[in-house]
Image (cartoon, grey):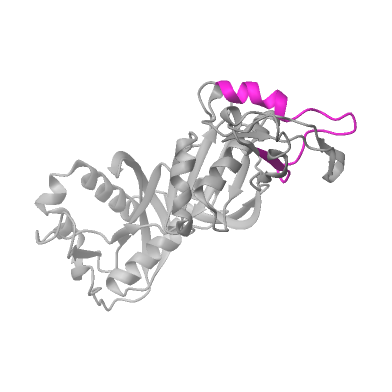
Amino acid sequence: MSLLLSNLSMMPIKMGKYLSKPCIPESSLLGSTSRRSLKSLAPKLLTKHSKGSWVRSTVAFRIRVMSASMNSSSPLAAENEVREVKLLDAINDDHEGVIVNMKEPMDSKAFSSALRASIVHWKHQGKKGIWIQLPIELVNLVEPAVKEGFWYHHAEPKHLMLVYWIPEGIHTLPANASHRVGIGAFVMNDKREVLVVQEKSGVLRGKSIWKFPTGVVDEGEDICAAAVREVKEETAIEAEFVEVLSFRQSHKSFFGKSDLFFLCMLRPLSFDIQAQESEIEAAQWMPCEEYAAQPFVQENELLKYLYDVCLAKKDKGYSGFSSVPTTSSFSDKRHYLYLNSQDLNGKYGGL
């Protein structure tokens, strides 16, 4: 059997857009969508109508199924075997690409046919990047997408995002998130004691090393809020955020990702400690000199720097970065700008 696109009668599409009458062999449309085949297909599949632009992606291609063994005595036998290949629904993104959000179950072969036809259509429209979001229950569509040249961009608990680049040459699609963000909390009471913990897991497990509370910033969580949350979770201490004192960037940290670590100063609002049972072996208030005297701190250049910054804040007027709620022209949602308020005459708060 071979497949041919049947002639399509002129059909009106939204905003006066029309589709002409393509007739393309299966080997071109339904085979592997190579760069060469895309170049040859695009002019044949879509032509510009005098009253409008190119057809929208909701148009369906009609495919005629023809038997290779059909003799000349039955030329109309295949004319009745016509089925449609509907293009995948997509929305335009802000960068001359399209986003396909698959929601309904679909046979993998039907998906392959629709995907190939859609790529041709989007190429003719001048689109560049194609994004396909596949929910976890549509895992059967991953393989056919990969076979058409798509690659993984990122995965979330409930979906996988795949991408494809239509133009020749190196793609300019943004990479997946490159950094993980973490915080460390410097909390000192009026007795010059710092809040420290020992962890039950990780590289410091069982080594009797006291450290500042630390943790990872959750998705959608502000740095200042994460610092307050981690202190509360690990020690039950209520605290308020004061400043970001410093930050460090490192690379190849977590599954090859880079890491941003923000050292935050917090002011304690309560003082009775209760160690988190699941993650913390012990927690206490410790004299700052005793904390600094630990061999682990003395032999770690980064920790020595961080401790010096903390003391400079308490004793020498060192100014970190206060959190200032603000908005931008891109979003009305309030977010935080971190800045040195001291050199702005205290206009934005801080100590």
The residue lying furthest to the front in this view is: 73
Direction from residue 308 to residue 140 in the image, left or right: right
Verify whether residue 46 appears in magenta. Answer: yes
Rendering coords of residue 239 (x, y %): 38, 69
Direction from residue 30 to residue 225 in the image, left or right: left
Along the viewing direction, whichever of 189 and 38 lies nearer the viewer: 38
Relative height, residue 62 to residue 73 (above, below)? below
Name the image quarter holding residue 152: top left
Rendering coords of residue 333 (x, y %): 62, 58
Along the viewing direction, whichever of 204 and 66 lies nearer the viewer: 66
Verify whether residue 293 appears in magenta. Answer: no
Does the image show residue 103? Answer: yes
Rendering coords of residue 341 (x, y %): 51, 50
Identify which residue is drawn at 50% across, 48% down: 108
Name the image quarter holding residue 59: top right
How many numbered badges does the structure rendering display?
A: 0
Does the image show residue 185? Answer: no
Identify which residue is drawn at 23% across, 68% down: 279
